[in-house]
Amino acid sequence: MAITVDLNADLGESFGPWTMGDDAAMLKIVTSANIACGGHASDPDTMVATLREAGANGVIAGAHPGYADPMAFGRRVLPMSTDQIERMVATQIGALLGAAALAGVQVRYVKAHGALSNVASDDRGVADAVARAVRAVSRDLALLAISGTELEGAGHGQNLDVHSEIFADRAYLTTGRLVPRSRDGAMIHDPDEAGRRMVRVLETGRMPTIDGGEIALAAHSICVHGDSPGAVDMARHVRRTLTDAGITIAPFMAPR
C-alpha cells in the first residue's frame, strides 16, 4: 500500500535581531510550515519574511498560535479562561493572515503551539476554544492536531478539516501524550532512530512509548522541531529515510 505523509516544522520564531533556527534551510526540506503569530514568538517582519520564503519554496503555510508568553517561548501554562484563549487564538491567527496578505501567500491551516497544544490535548474546554477560534476566523482553515487528542474531536465538532500529527523528535507516553520536556528521554536526538521510528509508525500505525509497549496513532503529518539543536540535519535525515522506504513526502493540504 502506498504511503504519503506531510513533513512540517515550527518556523518564523525569531524576534527582532534574535534568531531562532535556520528557517531558510528547513523550508527546503519540509512541505508545511507552522508559522508563529506574535504570541510565543515572532514579529511582523519575521512573519512576512517567513511567509514569503515558504511561498517561494512551495511550502504550505499554517498559523501557529500559542500562549502570549515569549519569555517562556509559550511552554508554560497561563491562567486563562476558555473565552480568553478563544480570543487570543483568533487574534493571533488574524495577525498572520494580515502578514500573509502582504506576502501574497495563503494561510491554509492552524496548529496550536507548545503548552497550549498540550493543554488542548486533554482539556476539551480548551480544545473547543481553539477550534471555535479557528472556525470564527475562517471555515476554510484546517486544523492540524496531535494525533489521538481532544483537539481532534473539537475540530470535528466545529466541522473543520482535521489532520493528525505525530512527532519525529519527541518520545511518547502510553497515554498517547508527549513525554514532558522536563523528563529525561523526552527529545530524540539521534536522526537514525527518529527516521526508523517514523517509517515503522507509518507502516504499522503503532508508536513505541518510553514506558514500554506501543499505542495506535494516525498520522497525516510528521513534525520536526525547527528550534531543536541539529534540527536541519534531523529533518533532512528523516525525509531521506522516509523516501528511501518508498514513502512519498507531500503536503497534507493540496497547494492552491
Image (cartoon, rainbow, N blue to C red):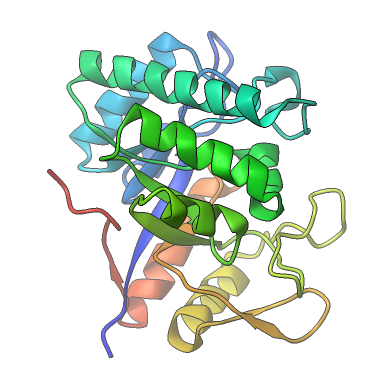
Q: Position of residue 145 (x, y in %)?
A: 50, 53
- Vertical placement of residue 49 versus 195, above or below: above
- Vertical placement of residue 37 versus 148, above or below: above
- Vertical placement of residue 108 versus 148, above or below: above
User: In this view of the protein, which residue sits in the foreground, 106 or 196?
Assistant: 106
**Residue at the location (33% across, 19% down)?**
49
Quadrant in the rendering for residue 23: top left
| Residue lying at the far left of the rendered structure | 256
Image side of residue 195 versus residue 210, left or right: left
User: In this view of the protein, which residue sits in the foreground, 209 or 24?
Assistant: 209
- Residue 112 appearing in the image: no
User: In this view of the protein, which residue sits in the foreground, 166 or 240?
Assistant: 166
Q: Position of residue 223 (x, y in %)?
A: 50, 55
Q: Quadrant of the N terminus?
A: bottom left
**Residue at the location (27% across, 43% down)?**
59
Q: How many marks?
A: 0
Q: Position of residue 37 (x, y in %)?
A: 48, 23
Q: Quadrant of the C terminus?
A: top left
Quadrant in the rendering for residue 207: bottom right
User: In this view of the protein, which residue sits in the foreground, 185 or 128?
Assistant: 128
- Vertical placement of residue 16 versus 127, above or below: above
- Residue 161 appearing in the image: yes
Image side of residue 173 versus residue 99, left or right: right
| Residue lying at the far right of the rendered structure | 183
**Residue at the location (30% across, 32% down)?**
138
Image side of residue 251 versus residue 69, left or right: left
Q: Position of residue 78 (x, y in %)?
A: 77, 27
